[in-house]
Amino acid sequence: MGSLARAYGRPLATLITGITLLWILVLILVPLGAMVEQSLWWRDSKGDVSLAIDRLYNDISLIELDRNAETDPAKQAAFDKALAEKQAEVATLEAEEKNPPKTYGFANFTRMSALHFYIFVRTILYALLVTALALVVCYPVAYVVALASGPRKAVILMVALIVPYAINELLRVYAWLMILDYRGVINGILGWFGVVDLDNRGWIPFLENPSAVFLAMIYTYVLFMVFPMVNTLETLDRNQIEAARDLGASTARIHRRVIIPHAKPGIAVGCIMTFMLSAGSYSVPAIMTRGQGGDWFSQLVYRQFYESNNWNMGSAYAVSLLVVCTAFILIMMRLFGVGLRDIAK
Amino acid sequence: MRGKDVRLDKVSIRFGDSIAVQPTDLAIHAGEFFSILGPSGCGKTTLLRTISGFIQPTEGRVLIGGEDMAGKGPNERPTALIFQNLALFPLMSVAENVAFGLEARGVPRAERQRRARELLELVALEGFGDKKPADLSGGQRQRVAIARALAVEPSVLLLDEPLSALDLKLRQHMRTELRAIQRRVGITFIYITHDQGEALAMSDRVAVMSRGRLEQVADADTLYADPATPFVASFVGEQNVLHGTVAGLTDDIVQVDTPVGRLSGRVKGPLAVGEAALVLVRPERIALGVGGAPAGENVIAARLASRSLEGASVHLVCAAAGQNLTVTVPNGPNVRELPEELSLSFGTRDALVFPVGALAHG
């Protein structure tokens, strides 16, 4: 604030700081805070209360029947008293049913079922696998774009990488669906050659295998892996590669000792982005599996919100995913020995 | 380590339509400190990269130690290259940098470390092994690059203007250092530079290059005193250049009519009476005539235009018939009271007469 005021004057500095704070508040603190708050409380489902109310209404009906059959005023008064008691009890119970008390605690996190926890762990593992595969696929691409081709070629390659991103993500995923479907492009070609028999449902069920999701995901997020890597690789002094070769290093050693260490920040950023996107991806698994492969955790979160209508549980699931993703970022940063400063570059 | 000789056999290099190096024959002796001197863009770096194997010659052969290097990559040649920007690996320690070539050859770690220590000692950098290159000064980084290149025991060390990034004092210090290291290890050094001072001070022999062609290959004294072409004459050291027409020719002495009068000088190249010629005289070969000049020598009457003190010597710019001539005289008690009118004189042996050809500095 002090240095800002010196550079821009007090009014402008106040404005800049204000906008920044507003930005942090609106985009980070409020939504996150709402989510965390939501995940920390629940209302007990009042099944037993409803049952008790039903019983009381039964009792009331019986008492009313008995009272109407009775002619003795003394007994009638006794029935009326019992009736009033029951009705008061019903009123309190109904009030309780209508507005159950909030309970705060971590139960939303600990109450996750074994199946949901299994899906959670599997999603994290799948996301890690997607990240690793994307890294393997993208490193050579990034290397060729940044170092191994002339500037003209690099531009063409870059454009070729970006062009698919002009199309909506959903459409790109659907394209893969069409390719891998039972009667999709690949099965169609195989059928044409007589490898599979489409008429008798003898197709290869690509979509029932998690690798179909992996494939579509890698395709969808490839740019987020390639871009940061190209950016760091482009800053590598090519003389270093030549020097290493001149000193007798093999291509593999040059990559291992010179190029990859230099690209580390880019690799870390690419891995973080790809992991975050794939761990939280909803559309890709939803479209690619069509319910025929296993769910991803993001689909569970969606269901908690919109099908179970249990926002508290959904929030807890979302927060769990967020915590794991944040931990992943920190681990990657530690693993690659890069600081926030390197990543910001 | 043993030096090997390098031979270029009709090597020419073309990039598309442009010719970077004209067909060139060159023999560099084993264990020699050889410099290739030329202005930027003359093809000297291309030539160096061809010797190191990064560029394949379009035509001709490169032989190192008598062995044809065709088809051999930079990692298969007995050469090591020191890059202009040194290209040290910034993420490795100094010792790792030095040992990298050994690592690439599968030398065990303990042996690598021992060799790295030895080499760092050779370049006077003991105890710097654990530092990162960025923590060193320019001159120290320079020496790390030399140690790294020497680690692979090359027979030929190629240096691509490695001193150009250093300041003047350090550059002068590194010249002596490089020369001393070359003497100690005894291998062939091929040194690329555009700085004639570096080339003349360090080298056993120098090749002067211009526009992809070798102009002259000789030792420093010969280059200076007996240049083969007007380019070499004007690129190495200072020259006064006078345009004229050949008036008379006897054996190796030629008379030339110039705007400042008839001058005589040594014949350098094919000349014929009536043809245009260039007369080149070095500023320090011109004497200020006080009395009459001895007969047979060249005398020019000139007027003192300006004077600049260089320390040990004084540069005088003299005007004669619309031509500016530079004269360098030793600083002494008399230079402060020079008369306006001077007579400049130089011997016939001091003037070189060339057929018209390309000059350095435009």
Image (spheres, coloured by chain):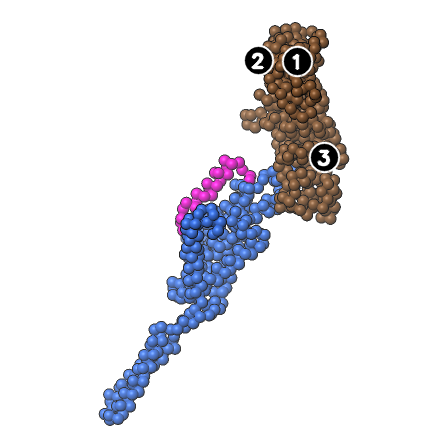
Chain colours: A blue, B brown
Q: Is residue A64 left or right of residue A121?
A: left
Q: Is residue A119 magenta?
A: no
Q: Which residue is found at the position 42% from the left and 70% from the top? A: A42
Residue B44 occupies quadrant: top right
Residue A184 in the image: state x and y as whole percent: 42, 50
Give the labeled residue for mark 3.
B177
Between tags 3 and 2, which lies in front? Answer: 2
Three-letter code for the amino acid on which mark 3 is drawn: Glu
Give A154 or B42, whichever is nearer the viewer. B42
Residue A87 occupies quadrant: bottom left
Residue A24 in the image: state x and y as whole percent: 44, 55
Give the labeled residue for mark 1.
B344
Q: Is residue A153 magenta?
A: yes
**Mark 3, secondary structure of its residue:** helix
In the rendered structure, which disc, 1 or 3, sits on the residue that comes first in sequence? 3
Q: Chain of mark 3?
A: B
Three-letter code for the amino acid on which mark 1 is drawn: Leu
Q: What is the magenta range?
A: A147-172
The answer to whether marks 3 and 2 mark residues whose Cβ atoms lie closer than 8 Å is no
In the rendered structure, which disc, 1 or 2, sits on the residue that comes first in sequence? 2
In the rendered structure, which disc, 3 or 2, sits on the residue that comes first in sequence? 3
**Do circles 1 and 2 both sit on a common chain?**
yes
Give the labeled residue for mark 2.
B322
- Total numbered labels: 3
The answer to whether marks 1 and 3 mark residues whose Cβ atoms lie closer than 8 Å is no
Q: Which residue is found at the position 59% from the left and 27% from the top? A: B41
Give A57 or B291, whichever is nearer the viewer. B291
Distance from the alpha carbon under mark 1 to that under mark 2: 15 Å
